[in-house]
């Protein structure tokens, strides 16, 4: 998944990223390939330990905590990749309006 995302220049969702070890790229399955513990110090959270490479990841469990990607001010622009038939009708209308504007400018001069 990580390789395909990098090749197609896409971002993986945070929920998917949390199920893959950052060091060895193995899937983190609680009880099989990962140990999951609740910790209270220094910050309350969930501690994931990969049993393949023994790397540790911490995720806070604060009330009201949101990832940056989940916050509304993180979204700058949303692209609509709808069907092409819908887009063609919009572009033809825009082209007609532009053509009318050009003819009006020519007539005024």
Image (cartoon, rainbow, N blue to C red):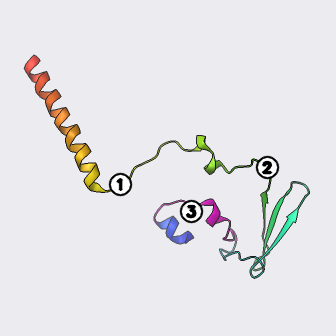
Chief secondary structure of the magenta span?
loop
- The mark that comes first in sequence, 3 or 1, is 3
Whether the residues at callouts 3 and 1 have beta carbons within 8 Å, the answer is no
> Which quadrant would residue 43 be assigned to in this image?
bottom right
Q: Is residue 68 among the parts visible in the rendering? A: yes
Q: Name the residue: 15% across, 33% down.
A: 99
Name the outermost residue toward the bottom: 32
Q: Which residue is mark 1?
A: 82
- Residue 6 is a magenta residue: no
Badge 3 element:
loop
**Of the two numbered discs 2 and 3 in the rendering, the one whose residue sits closer to the viewer:** 2
**Residue 12, numbered circle:** 3
Judge from the rendering whether residue 90 lies leftward or rightward of residue 101; answer left or right.
right
Q: CA distance from mark 2 to mark 3?
A: 25 Å
Query: In the rendered view, would you say 93 is above or below 70?
Result: above
The label on residue 63 is 2
18 drawn magenta:
yes
Percent position of residue 22, x then y = 68, 68
Mark nearer the viewer, 3 or 1: 1
The part of the chain drawn in magenta is: 8-23
């Amino acid at each position: 998944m990580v390789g395909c995302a990098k090749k197609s220049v896409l971002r993986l969702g945070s929920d998917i990223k949390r199920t893959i070890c950052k060091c060895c790229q193995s899937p983190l399955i609680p009880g099989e390939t990962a140990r999951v513990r609740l910790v209270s110090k220094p910050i309350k959270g969930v501690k994931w330990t990969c049993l393949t490479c023994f790397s540790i990841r911490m995720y806070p469990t604060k009330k009201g905590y949101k990832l940056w990607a989940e916050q509304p001010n993180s979204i700058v622009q949303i692209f609509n990749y709808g069907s092409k038939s819908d887009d063609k009708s919009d572009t033809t209308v825009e082209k007609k309006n532009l053509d009318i504007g050009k003819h009006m400018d020519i007539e005024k001069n």
